[in-house]
Image (cartoon, grey):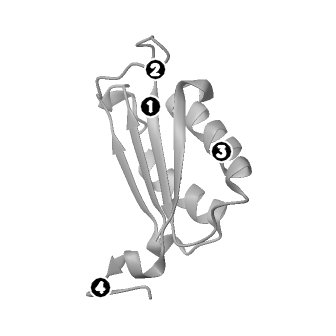
Amino acid sequence: MPTFNVFVSIKKEDVPDNFLTEASAFIAKLLGKPESYVTVRVVPDQMMCHGGSTEPCGSVQLMSLGSLGPKNKDHSAEIGKFLEEKLKIKKDRFYITFFDIARNDCGYSGTTFA
């Protein structure tokens, strides 16, 4: 159930057309999860300030059932590189918050993963 939420100050038209599908494949590979469970949400045109500056910036959340924790430093490096390349937002212009969700705290298809 990886969910990759990307809130950015850049305009919708500056998000590449294939960003959603590329991000979906990227997160699946990064976490070793089936892409059929990955959700990607991009919220552009956000009024944001980071470090006292309104230069392009963002706020990123990655939620998953497992695959997080000790590997977050590596995940952060890979996500930073990916977003800097694809969205042209410098990796020091966003934070990434990781959420390792308990199986009973995630509903899907009328039940939970517990």
Classify mark 4: residues with Cα within 10 Å, few (<14), some (14-19) or many (20+).
few
Distance, label 4 to label 1, CA atoms, is 31 Å
Location of mark 2 (residue): 50
Q: Earlier in the sequence, mark 1 or mark 2?
A: 2
Helix, strand or loop at label 1? It is strand
Dot 4 and dot 1 residues touching (CB under 8 Å): no
User: Which residue is label 3 attached to?
Assistant: 76
Category of crowding for the residue at label 3, using alpha-carbon neighbours closer than 10 angstroms: few (below 14), some (14–19), many (at least 20): some
> Can you identify the residue that label 4 sits on?
109
Residue type at mark 2: give it. His
The quarter of the rendered structure image containing the C terminus is: bottom left
Which x, y percent locates residue 79? Answer: 61, 44
Which amino acid lies under the numbered mark 1 shown in the image of this protein?
Gly
In front: label 1 or label 2: 2
- In primary-sequence order, the first of circles 4 and 1 is 1
Asked if the residue under mark 2 is in contact with the one under mark 1, i.e. CB atoms within 8 Å, the reply is yes
Q: How far apart are marks 3 and 4 (CA)?
A: 30 Å
Identified at 35% across, 23% down, the residue is 48
Please tell me whether mark 2 or mark 4 is closer to you in this view: 2
Distance CA(mark 3)–CA(mark 1) = 14 Å
Q: Is residue 36 left or right of residue 28?
A: left
Q: How crowded is mark 1: few (under 14 residues within 10 Å), some or many (20 or more)?
A: many
